[in-house]
C-alpha cells in the first residue's frame, strides 16, 4: 500500500487549529453544513490532459477517534460514496503540531489501498500519474484553508465581544 506524509504551514496557533480541524472533519463525516456533499478533487492538468476543469469524487469520511498524546491526531478513513470498489481507500490521520506561539503545522499521513491490486498500482503510477496522492494533497490544502478561515472567524468574533461586550 502506498504511504503518504504531507505537511502544510498554518499561520494560526495550534490549540484553536486543532479544535477547528476536529470540527471540520466531524462536519464532513456527518455530511453537514457547508461540508455537505464534500468531494475530493483532481485537476485534469495533473493527468496530462488539457487543464480545463477537474474530476470530483464525493467521499464518505469515517472518524476513528482523536488522540492528544504523544502527538495530536484525528484518525479517519475515506471511501468514495459511489463505485467505491474502483477508487482508492485512505486510512490515515490529520494532526496539528505547534511550530511557534502563533503558528502551527498541519499534517496528513497514512496509506491508501488501490483497487484491483497490482493492476490498480500500475494504473495509478503510469496512466493516472499518482492521481491518488495528488488528490490527497488537494484535500490537505482544502483543510488547511478551512482551518485558517474557521480560526480567524472565531478570533474576530471574540475580538468583537471584547470590544462591544464590556457594558460601556
Image: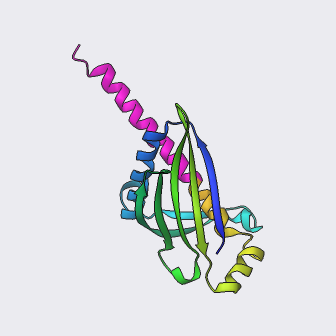
Q: Residue at x 57, y 52 (%)?
A: 107
Where is residue 160? Give x, y as percent.
35, 26
Chief SS of the magenta region: helix
Residue 143, magenta (yes or no): yes
- Which corner quadrant of the image does residue 28 belong to? bottom left
Taking the magenta stretch, the answer to whether it contains residue 153 is yes
At x 47%, y 75%, the residue is 81
Q: Position of residue 59 (x, y in %)?
A: 48, 69
Q: Nearer the viewer, residue 115 or 91?
A: 91
Q: Image quadrant for the C terminus? A: top left
Residue 134 vs residue 99: left or right? right
What residue is drawn where x is 47% and y is 62%? 75
> Foreground residue, 66 or 159?
66
On screen, residue 94 above or below 154: below
Q: Is residue 98 visible?
A: yes
Q: Residue 21, relative to residue 99: is it above or below?
A: below
* Image coloring type: rainbow
The magenta region covers 141-168
Amino acid at each position: 500500500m502506498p504511504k503518504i506524509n504531507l505537511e502544510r504551514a498554518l499561520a494560526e496557533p495550534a490549540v484553536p487549529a486543532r479544535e477547528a480541524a476536529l470540527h471540520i472533519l466531524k462536519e464532513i463525516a456527518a455530511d453537514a453544513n457547508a461540508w455537505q456533499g464534500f468531494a475530493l478533487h483532481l485537476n485534469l492538468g495533473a493527468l496530462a490532459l488539457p487543464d480545463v476543469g477537474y474530476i470530483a469524487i464525493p467521499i464518505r469520511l469515517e472518524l476513528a477517534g482523536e488522540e492528544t498524546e504523544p502527538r495530536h491526531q484525528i484518525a479517519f478513513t475515506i471511501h468514495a460514496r459511489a463505485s467505491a470498489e474502483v477508487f482508492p481507500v485512505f486510512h490515515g490521520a490529520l494532526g496539528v503540531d505547534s511550530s511557534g506561539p502563533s503558528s502551527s503545522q498541519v499534517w496528513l499521513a497514512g496509506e491508501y489501498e488501490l483497487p484491483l491490486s497490482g493492476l490498480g498500482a500500475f494504473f495509478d503510477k503510469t496512466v493516472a500519474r499518482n492521481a491518488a496522492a495528488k488528490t490527497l494533497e488537494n484535500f490537505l490544502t482544502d483543510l488547511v484553508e478551512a482551518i485558517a478561515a474557521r480560526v480567524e472567524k472565531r478570533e474576530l468574533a471574540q475580538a468583537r465581544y471584547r470590544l462591544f461586550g464590556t457594558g460601556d
